[in-house]
Image (cartoon, helix red, strand yellow):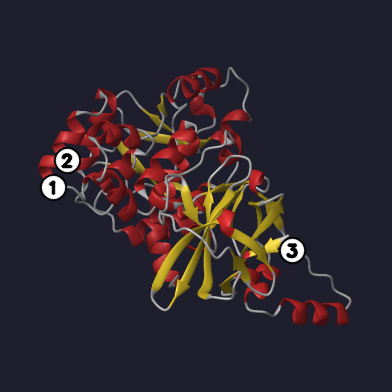
Amino acid sequence: MLYFSQLLNKKVLTEDGVDLGFFDDFIILISDIQPKVTKLVIKKNKKTIFVPINFLLKINKNFVIKKNYDLANLQANELFVLRNLLDKQIIDLTGNKIVRVNDVAFQKQNFDYFLVGVDISLLGILRRINLEDIFIRIMRFFNLNLKSTFLSWGQIQPLELTRGYVVVKGKEEKLAKMLPEDLADYLERTSIENVRRIIKLLDKRKAREVINSLNLNYQSFLIRRLKIEEIIDILSYLDSNEVVDILLTFNSKKREEIIKNLPQDFRKKINYLLRYSSTPVGEIMIVEYLQVKPDNTVKEVIDKIKREAADFSFLTTIYVVNEQNQLIGVFSLHELICQNLDTFVYQFMHQNLIVVHLKTPKKVVLHKMFKYDLQVLPVIDNNKKIIGIVTIDDLKDIILKNLKI
C-alpha cells in the first residue's frame, strides 16, 4: 500500500534520467467502487504538466516514467487528490459522523493504481510531517499502541469535491443518523449545490432540524440563491419564527413575493408574526401552541394533540382559555399523561400564571424563565389573550452573549 504523503514531492525522472520536476498530485477518475489513478501531476518551477499514468514505469526513491511520454488534460469526473480530497471533510457512513482526511492510500493492481481508502487518524498527520516512526517508538516505550484509522472508499461519502459535485451512494439512512448540528456545520462551508443535494436526501423532519441549525446569515444566503419554488420548499421545513427572521432580511418587494407563494395557513401565520416583529418579544415569538377549554377531558386534549400538533417543533405546555379566549390556566404534558382519561382540565391545571408581553425586554423574559424554572412562557395581549409563546431556545443568543461564548 502506498500513502500519498510518502509520494508527495518525490523527484520525477524519465527512464533515461531526465529530471522533469517533482510529483505534485494524482488525478483520479471517480468511481463508486475504487477510483482509478489516471494521471500524474508534475511541477517544475511554476510549470505544471499532466502525464497519463500508463507512462509510469515504477515508484521507488523517485517516480520513473517512459522517455517518450505524452501530456494530457483534465477530463470530466476527474479530481485532484491533494486539492479535492486531502484535508477535506468526508461523511463516515460507518460511524455516522464527519471526519477529516489526513492521508490517502493507493494500491497497485497489475499495471493500474487505485485509491483504496483514507486515513483519518493522528498517524496520517504525523506521516505527512515525517514524524510517524518517531512517535510510534515513543508510544511503544510507554507500552501504548497507536494505529491508523483507515476507511475504505466504500465506507465514505466525499463532501468537498470540485464544482460542488457529490457522489450519492444510496446511504440516505446513514445521513439521517448524523447529528443535525454536524451536518449544518458542514453545509455552511460547502456549495449551494451540495446543500440542495443533501437536504433532498433527508426526510422532512431531519431536514428541518438541519436547516434550523444553520445560522441566520447562511439561511438567508442560501435562500437568496434559490428559485422561488425552491425557496418555498426550504421555508416549509422551518419554524414560523425562523421564517420571519429570514424574510426580514429581504427587501419588501421580495418578501411580499415569497409570502404570496406560501401555503394559505402558513401565510396567515407568517403575516401574523410580521405584525409584531418590531417588538422585543414579537421578533422571537412563535405561534405553534395548543390551547384547550377548562371543561375538556384528558382524552379530548390527547386527541387534539394528535390532530393539531403533529408538526409542532416544540410542545411541552398546553394553555387553557375561557369562552372569551383569555388565558386562565396551564399544564404540562407530564401532568396530562398522569391523569385519568375522563379527568377534566380544570381539575389539574395551574392558575398561577407566569406571562410576558410583546414589549417585555428579552432579558426580563430570560430572568423569568430561570427564576421559575420554565422552558416556555406565553405571550399575552392587553386583553389577556394568548398571541404566541417564547421558548428558552429562542433566547439562546442572549444566553451565549452573557456567557461570552
| Viewer can see residue 350 | no
> Does dot 2 land on a helix, a strand or a loop?
helix
Front residue of 305 and 242? 242
Residue at x 15%, y 34% (from the top left corner):
257
Left or right: where 344 falls relative to 259: right
- Checking the image for residue 255, the label placed there is 2
Hey, what amino acid is under mark 3? Ser
For marks 3 and 2, the one nearer the N-term is 3
The percent coordinates of residue 356 (x first, y second) are: 33, 49
Place residue 334 in its image quadrant. Answer: top right
Query: What residue does disc 1 label?
Result: 251
The label nearer to you, 3 versus 2, is 3
Q: Residues within 10 Å of mark 1 (few under 14, many from 20)?
A: few
The percent coordinates of residue 276 (x first, y second) are: 21, 44
Residue at x 75%, y 79% (from the top left corner):
135
Residue 59 lies, with reference to residue 117, above or below; the image says: below
The label nearer to you, 1 versus 3, is 3
Residue 92 lies, with reference to residue 381, above or below; the image says: below
| Viewer can see residue 256 | yes
Hey, what amino acid is under mark 1? Asn
- Checking the image for residue 148, the label placed there is 3
Marks 1 and 2, how far apart in space?
6 Å
Front residue of 266 and 354? 266
Front residue of 325 and 221? 221
Hey, what amino acid is under mark 2? Arg
